[in-house]
Image: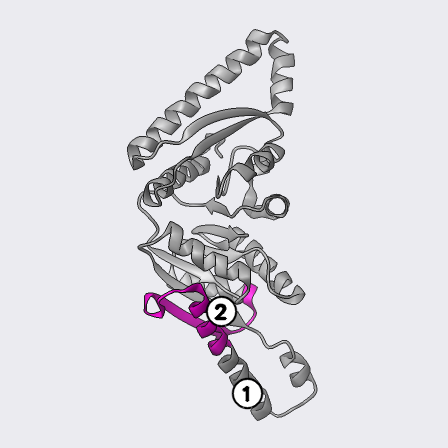
Amino acid sequence: MTDFSPGARHAAQRAAILGATCAIQKGVLLHVLEKSWLDTLKQFLGTSVEVEKGIIDDTSRSLAELAEEVRQLSGFSLEPQVRSGDTLDTLVEAAPDFDLLVLGARGRHPVWALALGTTSQRLLSKVHQPVLVVKREAEIPYQRVLVYTDFSPNSLKGLQYAQMIAPQAFINLVHVFEPLLERKIISAGVSDEVVEQYRVDAQLEAEAEMTRFIAEAGTDPRLLLRLIEHGHAPGKLPEIAAKWAPDLIIVGKHGRSRIEEFLLGSVTLHMLAQSPCDVLVAE
């Protein structure tokens, strides 16, 4: 999806690089002429069919030029398509035909300020495809990928996506645990030794789950860096990402329980808003 902004251009470049890297059969470069804007422009310039056709023709030429630019960069051809309508609704309508949606983090139109919260929530709640939000200029395939896991099926998809779209990348598989009863234990006035043992047990349980998770994914554990830390995931994960400096972060949309799903949703929104690198939200 592009609106010809620099961020959307980066998204088009990344989509083409993924197409070439992953041997994708078909890719579409979509631009939506916002119907409300088009109607206003037609009213201002005139209501003739020629006015609308001229706007569509000009947009189609610009889109074809962008598609050729990214083809020369990557060797992969994206089919340019121009549609008119509500931008978000049009994207949702087109989504089922594709395996991955690639968008820029910032656009010329306010509807594409995806990292600001409400629009990203609306989009992610309406589509069932993974969404890749591109924040940086794309020049080479992903080299360092951080995958956040809560050991849910959605997290498993996230790791699988990492292996598909970044087969040569170094993957850091991260889990942040926060024992659900820890605060109650502390508020009950138990000794520090009891609290520490509770954390140790939770750490051991997380390590065992991590081993099972990797085995279920069928991934060679020697190809992964595993990191398990104690803390509050929405706040802890940005700290980990800042230290490790990935060029892609993958998070799931849904957790395995209501509490974890709420936390994972918080993680997703935090990373969309705060991460300087690309973020893929796995469905």
* Precedes in sequence: disc 2 or disc 1: 2
Please identify, in this view, whether the residue under mark 2 or under mark 1 is nearer the observer: 2
Residue under pointer 2: 175
The residue shown at (55%, 7%) is 50
Mark 2 burial class by Cα count in 10 Å: few <14, some 14-19, many 20+: many
Span shown in magenta = 206-234
Left or right: residue 17 compared with residue 196: left
Image coordinates of residue 16 in percent, x first then y, are 37, 38
Image coordinates of residue 64 in percent, x first then y, are 40, 23
Let me know if residue 53 appears in the view: yes
The residue shown at (51%, 48%) is 130
Left or right: residue 73 compared with residue 55: left
- Whether the magenta-drawn stretch holds residue 227 is answered as yes
The circle drawn on residue 196 is 1
The residue shown at (51%, 70%) is 176
Looking at the rendered structure, the kind of residue marked 1 is Glu
Q: CA distance from mark 2 to mark 1?
A: 19 Å
Looking at the rendered structure, the kind of residue marked 2 is His
- Whether the magenta-drawn stretch holds residue 129 is answered as no
Left or right: residue 257 compared with residue 19: right
Image coordinates of residue 201 in percent, x first then y, are 53, 85
